[in-house]
Image (cartoon, rainbow, N blue to C red):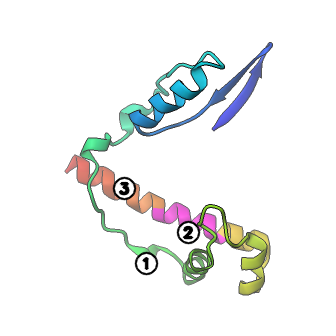
Amino acid sequence: MSDESVDDRFRITVTVTDEETILDLVDRVDDVVDARVVPDGGADDLVPPQSRPSSVRVDLRDLTPKQWEALELAFKRGYYDQPRSVDLQALSEELDISKSAVSQRLRSAEATVVESVLEGAMSASNG
């Protein structure tokens, strides 16, 4: 999501991946603001929902042992819960590393997993 101020107007850009959510979002805000759906231009590269595979193979060996440790601990302690049950500070204390190191490990691990999932989905839909 991004936002920018233009003259006396304010533009908020939200990226949503499914049509039902887009229509619901526009319905909710349309009474208050001028809301419209604008294609982002990069949608041609996306895998359409109806052709996404129901499963993909993910090779977790791409994660380093330290990334796996941080990811597993974060999951077990509730870092990915809504709302979070634990924050980066608590994870850093348990791992005995800095808060920024935990954040970096989690971001790297998340990026690796997401990349693997999306590459698997895209290759399955093209194959």
How far apart in space, not on screen, are marks 2 and 1 (Cα)? Answer: 11 Å
Q: Is residue 82 left or right of residue 93?
A: left
Q: Residue at x 45, y 32 (%)?
A: 42
* Residue 61, horizontal then vertical, whole percent: 43, 78
Q: Dot 1: within a 10 Å radius of its alpha carbon, few (fewer than 14), some, or many (20 or more) residues?
A: few
SS type, badge 3? helix
How far apart in space, not on screen, are marks 3 and 1 (Cα)? Answer: 16 Å
Dot 2 corresponds to which residue?
109
Residue flagged by tag 2: what amino acid is it?
Ala
SS type, badge 1? helix
Badge 3 or badge 1: first in the primary sequence: 1
Badge 2 or badge 1: first in the primary sequence: 1
Q: Magenta stretch: residue 86 in it?
A: no
- The image quadrant where one finds the N terminus is top right
Dot 3 corresponds to which residue?
119
Picture quadrant where residue 93 is located: bottom right
SS type, badge 2? helix
Q: Residue at x 62, y 63 (%)?
A: 107
Q: Is residue 56 left or right of residue 107?
A: left
Picture quadrant where residue 108 is located: bottom right
Which mark is nearer the camera, 2 or 1?
Answer: 2
Dot 1 corresponds to which residue?
61
Q: Dot 2: within a 10 Å radius of its alpha carbon, few (fewer than 14), some, or many (20 or more) residues?
A: many
* Residue 60, horizontal then vertical, whole percent: 42, 75
Kindly report the secondary structure that dominates the magenta region of the rendered protein: helix
How far apart in space, not on screen, are marks 2 and 3 (Cα)? Answer: 15 Å
Q: Are marks 3 and 1 in contact (CB under 8 Å)?
A: no
* Residue 76, horizontal then vertical, whole percent: 57, 80
Compared to residue 88, the image places residue 12 above or below, namely: above
Badge 2 or badge 3: first in the primary sequence: 2
* Residue 81, horizontal then vertical, whole percent: 59, 66
Magenta-colored span: 105-113
